[in-house]
Amino acid sequence: MTQPAEITDLIAQLETEADQQRDPETTPDVGIIMGSDSDLPTMEGAYDALLALGFEEQTDFENPPESRFTFESYVISAHRTPGLMYAYCETAADRGLDVIIAGAGGKSADLPNMTASIAYPIPVIGVPVQEKSVSSVIGMPTGAPIVAVDAGKSFNAGLSAAQILSREHTVLRDRLNDYHTDLQAGVGTVSKQLHDLGRDGFKNQQ
Ligand code: RP5
């Protein structure tokens, strides 16, 4: 398989990073990968959820953001860049990743389950980018697990990644609890408004 410099350079960078043995507090905790940059609008929910929980995006290996919790993102295609997919998955643990969120579209959305296989036992949260991608993402055979969200529900993938990390990091548990408390408060507010204003009054005040 001939690989262009754009791919071999990325692979070399990942392999170099894996050899650095950096302090885990300075490396991304979550990896967000997607089969195409056309998946980005759908995958942005994962970024939003992580940012809402105080994560920052790490774009420079040498200069991590201030936040203790960070994520990185790449476009990696199982079909078009299998070498890059292998390199990403095989270096993931040594580069300090604890969870990977993998999104892909199309009927043969292989990136999430291939990632789950190669990066095993790092937990992988699959995001089917389209409805027609759902069965290929969730259809892993017994013994080769993946967790997955519904089509397009990348925000939940971000929350799930934080939930996994929160078993080790109490501060994330607190932030997740605060997030859920805010969710409840929002429902409580509209519930009271709907009741007290009635349907017409409620609709008119929106
Ligand atoms: C999949 O093919 C990608 O995940 C994307 O959802 C879909 C189409 O990709 P592009 O043709 O837009 O690059 O592999």
Image (cartoon, helix red, strand yellow):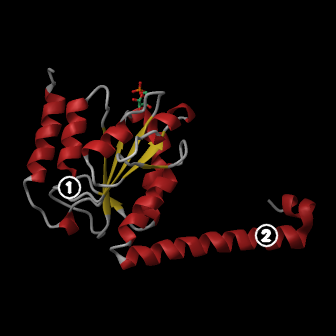
Q: Residue at x 11, y 45 (%)?
A: 15
Q: Residue at x 74, y 72 (%)?
A: 189
- Ligand 1 shows up in which quadrant of the image? top left
The amino acid sitting under disc 1 is Ala
State whether residue 74 appears in this view.
no
- Side of 9 relative to 30 (left or right): left
Q: CA distance from mark 2 to mark 1?
A: 45 Å
Q: Position of residue 124 (x, y in %)?
A: 36, 50
- The type of residue carrying mark 2 is Ser
Of discs 2 and 1, which sits in the foreground? 1
Please tell me how crowded label 2 is: few (under 14), some (14-19), or many (20+) other residues with Cα within 10 Å: few
Measuring from the top left, give residue 70's x and y in whole percent. 31, 61
Q: Position of residue 17 (x, y in %)?
A: 12, 51
Q: Is residue 48 visible?
A: yes
Residue 191 numbered mark, or none: 2
Residue at the disc numbered 1? 93
Few, some or many C-alpha atoms within 10 Å of disc 1 (few <14, some 14-19, many ≥20)?
Answer: some
**Dots 2, 1 in contact, CB < 8 A:** no
Rendering coords of residue 197 (x, y %): 89, 69
